[in-house]
Amino acid sequence: MGDLDGDQRFSMTIDKQQFEETMQTLNNLYAEAEKLGSQSYIEGCLACLTAYTVFLCMETHYEKVLKKIAKYIQEQNDKIYAPRGLLLTDPIERGLRVIEVTIFEDRSLTR
Amino acid sequence: MKNCEYQQIDPRTLPTPTPTPTPTPHHEPDGDRPEEPKGKPRRKWHVFPGKNRFYCDGRIMVARQSGVLPLTLGLILITSGLFFIFDCPFLVKHLTSCIPVIGGFLFVFVVITLLQTSFTDPGILPRATPDEAADIEKQIDNTGNTSYRPPPRTKEVVINQQVVKLKYCFTCKMFRPPRTSHCSLCDNCVERFDHHCPWVGNCVGKRNYRFFYTFIVSLSFHTAFIFGCVTTHLALRAQGGKGLVFALQESPGRYPLIMKCFNKPLTAVELVICFFSVWSILGLSGFHTYLVASNLTTNEDIKGSWSGKSGEDVTNPYSQRNIFVNCCSVLCGPMPPSLIDRRGFLPADESVQTAGADIELPDLANKSEINVCTQGTKGLLESATLPPLLSTSCPQGKPPTDPTVNFDPSPEISTSCSGARHVHHSRGRASTPRHTKTRSKKNKRAALQMANPSFDVPVSPSSPDAGPSSKARGHKGDSFSHLQ
């Protein structure tokens, strides 16, 4: 294909370091969600003793961190990416596998 | 095959395709179900593409083939019921009243964990959106390979200094994260796939493995307890009478007549069920305890992924080398949320925002183009079942430390492929930057045809490795492109 593909367009639009910083923060947040620490052990043991019925009433640590991540992505979108015509999709909506970056452009300018 | 030449799908040349009646990935952001524009909004579980059944408006899910779950429940209920009716009164009188308390507690525990195992999402991964699928297709075949035999679709990542191959799932249109496998019975990719258990009627995966383990352990205690109590009951009766046969025949006078008639064979039934259950369930519990202690899945154990039988020096990269830590991480680790959002509402069928661009819905004039692309894709996916073509110069055995996966201070932002989730493995290695996927226009719909299930080639979890011996990634403009 002769014209630029999405990747090239993306790398031209955003500052590499800025994006790296966003990614690194996200990675750290996910690491915090999945961290094996005393809190997760206590939560796990308590859940086991109650036959896991606590999961029906309590919000888990993971879910709390996911909310934090959603807020962070929203904030990053508002502050950094939307002014450049980009939009980050929360990875949770893609099965925590990819982060989707949408590039908005004026269709009248392209083929 | 109508069209033998593989035609690469370019998301920008495709018009937004007309919605097909076949199931499509339910995460389609713009909605592709125009047949219910009015009325109450539908939830996502209505359009879930896997073979699952949903109850209580999406709160409860089971596999479509519920297997023998009713039988399991029935056996547990009947045996426990018989125990409480026939054995407990005698034992309370002759031994202690703790017996029904313990029995009751175990019974409740067993039933709750069984129901949780059956009704919980095991860790199903939502299928890739058509945009993402087209993007991956584009990357894999970026060399302009026009033969209808695509290169084998694998990707290699390094986890804790161990090379792990990620396979491409043709049904879900994505590279499976590590330890993920596609269950052909449920037609879903399940994270940390252990096995599909017919007894609980569901897959056992990352999210419900702890329920499953607790279920089988508590069930082994429960059956052993009942077995012990029944044996004690018969022994005590035999002591008071003329032997075991007499004990089986006799019944105390305070039982009503109807129960006297049924008492003898029912106690024997209890004994038989418990005897056979105890050994099998205990064996299964022991096996799973071994798996938990070494942080393995049944799938990996059966395939021998980490046993080093292929001659290479392979070790389990997920194990923490400490039994206690392994147990804690598997059973008491954080509970990941369900990724499939079954109770979310489908978005209304509308066009999305673009900066100054106008969106055009497809007209029928474009249908021929869609068909051509469809056939091209069909050819691609059908031919993917053929033996893979060796088309790379990358020799097997060399651990290609793919810089896009390992943390690299200067990652190519322009890479846009879905990569392994880093979070599982960040303990052992540096963090992986999340891979970015770029797509040119949100309103363009790439290759909705690719989600057509008639093209799908589901991979069963027990299928042996297809033996892909080449990396199938290539990326235009990258310095680390391996596929030549």
Image (cartoon, rainbow, N blue to C red):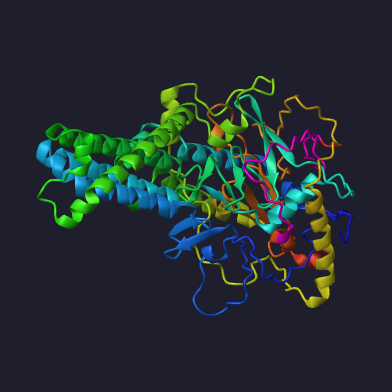
Left or right relative to B225: residue A75: right
- Foreground of the two, B109 or A58: B109
**Residue pictured at 42% horizontal, 55% vertical:** B70
Residue B119 in the image: x percent, y percent?
A: 43, 53
Magenta extent: B454-482
**Residue pictured at 65% horizontal, 57% vertical:** B129
How many numbered discs? 0
Q: Is residue A44 visible?
A: no
Residue B392 in the image: x percent, y percent?
A: 84, 34
- Foreground of the two, B72 or B377: B72
Report the quarter where the C terminus of chain B lies.
Answer: top right
Left or right relative to A96: residue B334: left
Q: Is residue B130 visible?
A: yes
Q: Is residue B470 magenta?
A: yes
Residue B408 sits in which quadrant? top right
Left or right relative to B24: residue B100: left
Please, which residue is most extreme toward the bottom here?
B38
Residue B259 sits in which quadrant? bottom left
Residue B386 sits in which quadrant? top right
Residue B413 in the image: x percent, y percent?
A: 70, 42
